[in-house]
Image: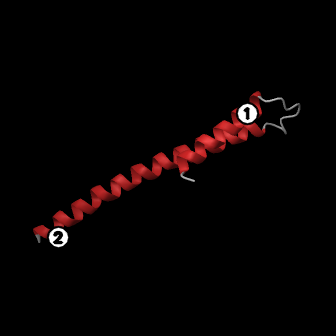
Amino acid sequence: MRDQELVNKLREHADWWENGDMMDPLGGLEKDLFAAADRLENQNAHIAALQQEIEKLRGQVFDFVVDL
């Protein structure tokens, strides 16, 4: 399962739990699921930004080596 699929499934389950027929939400499980989905989504965005920066730096190193 890809990360975005996991995020979507966590949100789906959290929504079901929050709006379902459960009498006791086990101390806020739905909030934990939403928080986990948010954290995964934020980490994925951060990783993508870091990967872009790495590619940029690789290009700079290549240009530097070529100019030598």
Position of residue 40 measured from the top left corner of the image (x, y, whole percent): 57, 47
Identify the residue at horizontal 31%, vertical 58% (top origin): 55
68 horizontally vs 5: left or right: left
5 horizontally vs 47: left or right: right
Per the image, the residue denoted by label 1 is: 16
Per the image, the residue denoted by label 2 is: 65
- Above or below residue 59? Residue 36 is above
Front-most of 33 and 62? 33
Position of residue 19 measured from the top left corner of the image (x, y, whole percent): 75, 27
Q: Is disc 1 placed on a helix, strand or loop?
A: helix
Cα distance in 3D space between marks 1 and 2: 56 Å
- Above or below residue 33? Residue 19 is above
Three-letter residue code for mark 1 = Trp
Q: Nearer the viewer, mark 1 or mark 2?
A: 1
Q: Earlier in the sequence, mark 1 or mark 2?
A: 1
Q: Residues within 10 Å of mark 1 (few under 14, many from 20)?
A: few
Residue 60: which quarter of the image? bottom left
Furthest-right residue in view?
Answer: 23
- Above or below residue 36? Residue 68 is below
Three-letter residue code for mark 2 = Val
